[in-house]
Amino acid sequence: MEWYGMSQYVNDGMPEIDQEDRRQFLKVVGLTGAVAAGSEFTLSDLRGEVEGEAAGELAAMGEAIREDLAGELSAGLLGNELAALEGQIERLPELRAMGVPAEDSTEYQQLAEPGLAIHEHLIEVGFFESAEEHLPEFTPEHIGATAREFINTGVLAGALSELGYSEAELTSTVVNVVNNKERLAMWVPTTEIPAGVEGFDPGNIAPLQQRAAAGVLLWTDYLDTYLWQNEVLLTETILDNNYGDLKQMYAGLHLLASAAEDLAGAQELSDAQLTAALSAGAAMMIVGQEDLTNDVMRITDEMRAPSALR
Amino acid sequence: MASIHERDEAVKAAQNIEMVEVEDGYTLTNLPDESITQQFDIDQIPERDVTQEDLTASAKEDPTNWLMYGGGYQQQRYTSADVITPDNVDGLELEYLVQSGVSSSMEGVPIVVSGDPPVMYQTNGPNHMKAINARTGETLWSYTYANPQGLLLCCDANNRGAAVHGDKVYMTTLDSGIVALDRYTGEEEWYASTGDHEIGYSATWAPIVYDGQVITGSAGGEYGVSGFVAALDPESGDEMWKTNTTPAEEWAGDSQEHGAGTVWMTPTLDPDSGKIHAPVGNPGPDFDGTVRPGPNRFTIGTLTLDANDGSINWHYGESPHDVWDYDSSATKIRVNDMEMDGETRDVVLSPGKTAWEYTMDAENGQLLERSEETTQHINMWKMVPHTDEDRRVAFVPGAHGGNDWQPPSYSQETGLMYMNQNNAPHEIFWEEAQYEAGQTYWGGGLNDWPDVDAPEGWNGNLSAIVAVDPSTGERVWRDWISQETTSNYLWGGSITTSTGLMFTGTQNGNIVAYDGENGDRLWQFQLGAPICSSLSSWYDPGEGKQYVAVQVGGSGWLHGGRRGSTVAVFGLSE
């Protein structure tokens, strides 16, 4: 049984990966024979070990999205906002060092602003509808294929490394996402809503990838107020976890945004890499925000800071 | 008593109404074509209009009145009446019983307007109201509102009480409206709709009247509506402002259109600052959060508005992105000048289904303290399981809390807050759910005790009456209501007096007077049916008596218990 509960974190706020996590992850990406099950590894260690995409399914998905959006995306807007987003991601350690925001703080709102602009533009051009139409739901097979592509494509992880993500952080993020396949499977694409539901207008629910991004941005926008209002409950552990969960969420948002920016301009990503960036990005955003909910928002008596009044 | 009902066309109409279970809750049938007023000796009603000054002083400064649901605007449910004390409460006697003649939901608070005689305005389901001589129990007029066909009711045909101002008395209606009556005659003055009942909007709480506004809320959070707080003109019913609780910028896609966040209990108001503290319920759908990512801001917690225009000041959320139906619908309590950690503070007190008491800074919503747990916490905030049986898990507090809607009270004398809370385990399971107008929109299902496996560590008590010091969060005392003596849940709220007493009712039919300091039961009286209502108390100088009133009869959305139709009034002379 999978339970919600506070994530297990190491000191830097990123998910702690144990032997069983590594074993499960290697199984999903098809490396049970190639790497000793449960042994320490990084994504770089696995690069070249996992099999690349043979059937071309990821590439076909990416190609379809590329065709849908040809000429629709604004390279200028996405370039500017992606640069601003990267600047904000690089500020994450500063936000952690800040601790509890002041009453009138807008620090976390600023973190969300470039993402909000990108999100709004992608809605306007039908990006999320296209992504949801052409990407499958989070089946174990699709998660495995996406993870293999992500591992083999140094480009996707490389961009995050340049933003300050360490090899260990990227590894723990990807392992955490892949091993949360049951939670990912609960996020049902709008297009997969079963037939026979009378009167329902699917237009009221955003496409899956949009929900993933919107959740990240709405949570971020809430944090100034939330953390300030709840200071009496907060511990350093909760603030560490807030930082780690944000790093996961923003790794995912950056993958989404950089894929859109590439699609609008340079088109350096292959079709399969585009698919991997969008699927991995959505998955990181989903798992990250669920971790944030459990680690930061649902503070039990065991988690809270001791009362100073009793 | 039976004879008066034979002559009461309003009672007859209400008796004919049937509540029937439908797929997604309940609806009413055999409804009257038009509203009915039956007058009796209305000349007994003193024609003195209720003023704003009367309302502001109600219960706390002026113990001869209990003019609104919470006693006063701050909803402390506290009376400064001091005739009944811990030393003489054993002499409290039953003065009279009023048989409403309508055996339906009994969750209301009788309000009382001082005078010679004082007049009680009493409501119960389904939208039946009476004016009663509060000295004798004699019915002076009787009224039944003609609800339309097609109501969608999640939980019962509830109505929790009336509000008064000037020459009028106001009642919310199950079709999401408000009706204003001439309180001297019972004749209808105006009706205003605040939401479309055919898509699930409803109204069950007592409104309040303040500074030329009738302030009301919204219900239907299990039917995919979008919540609001609204103010109407007391003379005409015209809308003055309406504030939506699910603004689009806080939601993904268009999910705010079914985001719920309803305000289905009476808002609290602080006349000094002009702030409304509204209790807000669950986001919609209840159990599937993936279609509404993010915190679902302004749901489940305290939403503070400016009473002048309804603008939002602050919100404190008790369960962001909730998927357990952990509403924060219990009425909020405003306390000004509370001593806390060496400072004098204005605070808002909130008991939620999460089974903590939250003490917040009234100016900005900052949490000043969260109490020790008020009931047990077992498997709380754990995974919502999938639909297969193996993944269900029992948890406490269940979907009815902790503190569901039952209003808490606060004592100026003891400085303690008193809460009636539940401690029963529930199971929730998740299934895909899509909104359809007028259909429940849970996004999952719920199993109620005893149809769940008792979780490890559960103490077997279904409910508890709890006292907390809101200045420290210390749980000062707790009276567990055991499974053996109570077959149903603890609904309804409490009141406090200036002599340190706390009165409440239990599901096994007892009205109980507690020593507010230590939880000792000083007096109780068996009324023969569950008490699901919240009490009121007033001092009648003409008689030299303090009275305590309580409605009797089962109600509620889970195990309501045996129906009743009685208002019991107790009194003690000086």
Image (tube, coloured by chain):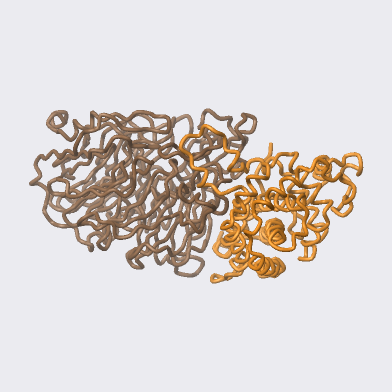
Chain colours: A orange, B brown
A34 on left or right of A75: right
Taking depth in this image into account, of B334 and A191 the one nearest to the observer is A191
Q: Position of residue B325 (x, y in %)?
A: 50, 43
Can residue A276 be seen? yes
Q: Position of residue B95 (x, y in %)?
A: 21, 40
B551 on left or right of B283: left
A111 on left or right of B140: right
Taking depth in this image into account, of A72 and B478 the one nearest to the observer is A72
Q: Position of residue A254 (x, y in %)?
A: 70, 60
Q: How many marks can you see? A: 0
Q: Residue at x 44, y 30 (%)?
A: B487
Asked which quadrant contains residue A225, the reply is: bottom right
Q: Position of residue B537 (x, y in %)?
A: 27, 49
Q: Quadrant of the C terminus of chain A?
A: bottom right
A169 on left or right of A217: right
Residue B28 versus residue A25 in the image, above or below: above
Q: Quadrant of the N terminus of chain A?
A: top right
Asked which quadrant contains residue B72, the reply is: bottom left
Taking depth in this image into account, of A211 and B385 the one nearest to the observer is A211
Taking depth in this image into account, of B269 and A58 the one nearest to the observer is A58
Residue B245 versus residue B451 in the image, above or below: below
Q: Residue at x 52, y 43 (%)?
A: A202
Can residue A244 be seen? no
